[in-house]
Amino acid sequence: MVVAGDEPQGLFSLGSLESTAAVRIPSTLAHFNQRYPKIHLALSTGPSGTMIDGVLEGALSAAFVDGPLVHPGLEGLPVFPEEMMIVAPYGHTPITRASEVNGANVYAFRANCSYRRHFESWFHADRATPGRIHEMESYHGMLACVIAGAGLALIPRSMLESMPGHQQVSAWPLAEEWRWLTTWLVWRRGAKTRQLEAFIALLNEDRQTVVSP
């Protein structure tokens, strides 16, 4: 519940990609809790498809998802560019195109993960096909399997470099047309609450602080 004229309060249910929650927004969430103690922030993580469904169904006030924004029932803003890295066992020869790793096993999230779809599209655009796709529950699990020499993974650079063990693999950005994806903050069209407005304002403050010299 939000009382007009008072400080924003009540439940603010926020969804997020795992990588965004891990490396992009922890400080913003801490600042938000400090500045708005009457707002109860509830964070949940999952793939883009699940997060978008949660927003459309009203279970989530807003969510960080992979762009671009295409659903007519959503509004949003782009917030974080992500450089996508193909991760291979240490010492692997440089990977510049999918045909070089045709048939390689892949470690990824479930089928409703936008990064997984991006990885599969990268293969198919080069007339290549991944081998078995092993569905994992976390980036740490993916990285462990790659370190063990069992296959490949696609991980945002910001997430990869935050994880112990990232120096035990080889990694390269995808070719330029596949290299960058943008994370968006989205909400239901016409449903920008005071809690959400407060969160967006603070998010923009923190982003400006990060990019300022």
Image (cartoon, rainbow, N blue to C red):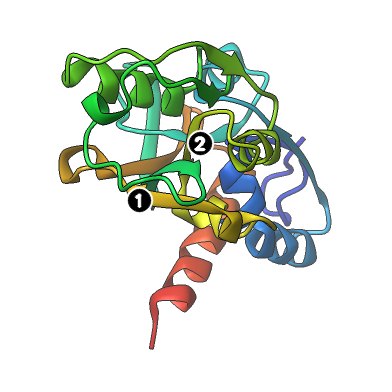
Residue type pointed to by label 1: Trp
On the rendered image, what quadrant is the N terminus found in? top right
**Which of 60/127 is in front?**
127
Question: In the rendered image, which residue does mark 1 sit on?
Answer: 172
Location of residue 135 with respect to 35 vertically, above or below: above
Find residue 117 and report its image quarter: top left
Residue type pointed to by label 2: Lys
Q: Residue at x 66, y 50 (%)?
A: 22
Question: Picture coordinates of residue 3 (x, y %)?
Answer: 74, 43
On the rendered image, what quadrant is the C terminus found in? bottom left
Q: Which mark is residue 98?
A: none
Location of residue 65 with respect to 210 vertically, above or below: above
Q: Residue at x 17, y 21 (%)?
A: 126
Q: Is residue 139 visible?
A: yes
Secondary structure of the residue carrying tag 2 is loop
**Which of 200/7 is in front?**
200
Location of residue 69 with respect to 90 vertically, above or below: above
In this rendering, would 83 be left or right of 155?
Answer: left
Question: Picture coordinates of residue 52 (x, y %)?
Answer: 51, 20
Question: In the rendered image, which residue does mark 2 sit on?
Answer: 192
Secondary structure of the residue carrying tag 1 is strand
Question: Picture coordinates of residue 62 (x, y %)?
Answer: 57, 34
Badge 2: how crowded within 10 Å, few (<14), some, or many (20+)?
Answer: some
In this rendering, would 208 be left or right of 143?
Answer: left
Find residue 128 and report its image quarter: top left
First in residue order: circle 1 vs circle 2: 1
In this rendering, would 38 be left or right of 23?
Answer: right
Badge 1: how crowded within 10 Å, few (<14), some, or many (20+)?
Answer: some
Cα–Cα gap, marks 1 and 2? 39 Å
In this rendering, would 28 be left or right of 128?
Answer: right
**Which of 174/146 is in front?**
146
